[in-house]
Image (tube, helix red, strand yellow):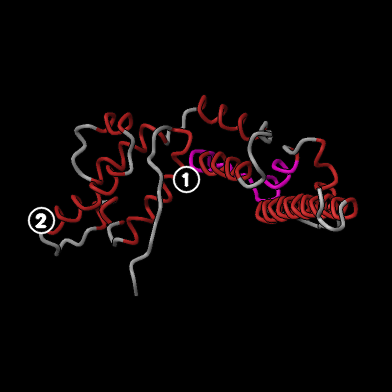
C-alpha cells in the first residue's frame, strides 16, 4: 500500500488549535508515533535509544507544522511529549474567560457574505471543535445544526425552510451538505442562464444578418 497523503496547515494561534491538534495526532498515528505523546505508554522493554528516536521523529513533525510565533513559545521543550503538553497548556486553556468568549463566538456565529457556503460551515466547525476541546458541556449535533441554519441571512429563508421541512431531527452534516448542494445548483443555474443569453444574442445577430454580411 502506498503512503497516505496528509495536508496540515501551520498552526499560528489559539483559534484553530482544537482542529489542528486532532489532525496532528492523526498525522502521528499514520507514522506510528502517537504513543510518544504519553511517555507512560512506551513499553518498558524498549531501549532508551529507541525511545529517544521515536521522540525525536515525532518532535520533528510537530515542529514542522508550527508557525514561528508559536515555535518560540515552546522553545526549550526538547521532546514531542513535552512540546505537546506545553502547547496544550498554552492553547487548550480551560479558563472561564476563554470558554465564555468561544461560546459567544459560537452562539452568535453569522455567515460571512464574502465567503461561500463551503467556507462558512468550515469556519463554524472549527469554532465548534475548539469549544468542544475545552468545555465538558458538549453541544449536540442538532443544536449545532440549528445555530448554523440561524446564521444564514434572510435571503436564504427559502433554503432554511426546505432543509427543515419534514424533519424530526437534523444534524450539522445534513445542513452542510444541503447548503453545498444548493450552492452548486445556483452556480449551475447561473451558468445555464449565461449560456442561454449568449445563444439568444447569437441568434438575434444571425436574424439581422442571415448571410453574415456587415
The foreground one among 171 and 160 is 160
133 is within the stretch colored magenta: yes
The outermost residue toward the front is 213
The foreground one among 99 and 203 is 203
Q: Report the Cα–Cα distance between label 1 and label 2.
A: 32 Å
Give the x, y percent position of residue 210: 87, 57
**Bounds of the magenta span?**
131-149
Give left or right: position of 144 versus 49.
right
Q: What SS does tag 2 mark?
A: helix
Q: Nearer the viewer, mark 1 or mark 2?
A: 1
Q: Residue at x 81, y 51 (%)?
A: 193
Image quadrant occupied by the N terminus = bottom left
Q: Which residue in the structure is indicated by mark 2?
A: 48
Q: Earlier in the sequence, mark 1 or mark 2?
A: 1
Q: Quadrant of residue 104?
A: top right
Main SS of the magenta part reads helix
Q: Residue at x 42, y 36 (%)?
A: 92
Give the x, y percent position of residue 213: 82, 52
Q: Which residue in the structure is indicated by mark 1?
A: 19
Q: Is residue 184 above or below residue 125?
A: below
Amino acid at each position: 500500500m502506498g503512503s497516505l497523503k496528509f495536508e496540515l496547515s501551520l498552526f499560528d494561534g489559539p483559534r484553530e488549535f482544537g482542529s489542528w491538534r486532532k489532525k496532528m495526532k492523526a498525522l502521528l498515528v499514520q507514522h506510528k508515533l502517537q504513543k510518544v505523546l504519553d511517555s507512560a505508554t512506551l513499553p518498558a522493554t524498549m531501549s532508551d535509544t529507541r525511545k529517544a528516536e521515536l521522540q525525536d521523529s515525532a518532535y520533528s513533525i510537530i515542529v514542522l507544522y508550527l508557525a514561528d510565533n508559536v515555535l518560540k513559545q515552546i522553545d526549550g521543550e526538547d521532546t514531542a511529549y513535552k512540546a505537546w503538553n506545553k502547547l496544550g497548556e498554552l492553547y487548550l486553556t480551560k479558563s472561564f474567560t476563554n470558554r465564555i468568549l468561544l461560546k459567544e463566538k459560537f452562539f452568535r456565529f453569522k455567515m460571512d457574505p464574502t465567503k461561500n457556503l463551503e467556507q462558512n460551515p468550515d469556519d463554524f466547525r472549527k469554532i465548534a471543535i475548539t469549544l468542544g476541546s475545552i468545555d465538558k458541556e458538549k453541544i449536540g449535533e442538532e443544536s449545532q445544526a440549528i445555530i448554523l441554519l440561524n446564521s444564514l441571512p434572510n435571503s436564504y429563508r427559502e433554503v432554511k425552510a426546505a432543509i427543515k421541512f419534514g424533519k424530526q431531527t437534523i444534524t450539522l452534516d445534513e445542513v452542510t451538505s444541503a447548503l453545498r448542494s444548493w450552492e452548486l445548483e445556483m452556480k449551475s443555474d447561473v451558468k445555464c442562464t449565461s449560456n442561454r443569453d449568449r445563444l439568444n444574442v447569437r441568434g438575434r445577430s444571425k436574424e439581422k444578418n442571415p448571410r453574415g454580411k456587415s
